[in-house]
Image (tube, helix red, strand yellow):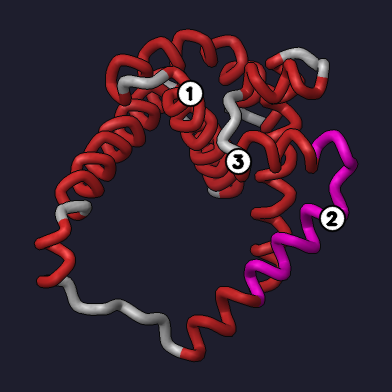
Amino acid sequence: MKNSASRLALYLAHRGSLVDFASPIVGCRAQAEDVVQEAYLRFSAAGERACEANRAIIHPVGYLYRTVRNLALNCVRRRALEKTSSDPDALVTLAAVMATPEQNVIYREELQAVAQALARLPERTRRAFELHRLGGHTLQQVAVILGISVGLTHQLVRDALTHCAECLDDED
């Protein structure tokens, strides 16, 4: 795909079927929407890298479906691992993992950068992001709360994610 607009158009055209594809794998439509959104971010980034290298993703729809499948399976694996690690006896065998002081500083700086990035967003975009990604609401719930369409809600959340990622990249 040549540019981000055509990647976005392709993604939006297949978004519903991608969510339908991921839902039975992850067992939850809301989780499937998160998987599909993450897949788009990876698809978009891969498309940018391909353009920079004067290449193209040969089968972009197949790439999207494969990415959704892989992310959905990772999600299922992660949940299964979390279930097994929630066993109280398993906690005794685990070593305490603590961040080093340097890692704590890095984490705090990244958190500050994200907070500053969110503060610079338009109110509606920031609110959509906070409700969906921090509040745990589905895109449909956020759309109802904000009185906008689900498509616009998705666009606002994606814009906020992209903005935060760009701000974190600028920090490096």
Above-or-below relation of 41 to 96: above
The range drawn in magenta is 109-125
Dot 3 corresponds to which residue?
133
Given residues 106 and 134, the one toward you in this image is 134
Residue that mark 2 sits on: 119
Q: For mark 1, give the secondary structure.
A: helix
Q: x, y percentage for residue 22? A: 36, 20
For badge 2, the amino acid type reads Ala
**Mark 3 crowdedness (10 Å alpha carbons): few <14, some 14-19, many ≥20:** some
Q: Earlier in the sequence, mark 2 or mark 3?
A: 2
Most common SS among magenta residues: helix
Q: Residue at x 70, y 42 (%)?
A: 130
In this orientation, which residue lies closer to the viewer: 143 or 8?
A: 143
Instruction: For the residues labelled 2 and 1, say whether their Cβ atoms are less than 8 Å apart.
Output: no
Q: Which residue is mark 1?
A: 30
Residue 33 vs residue 160: left or right? Answer: left
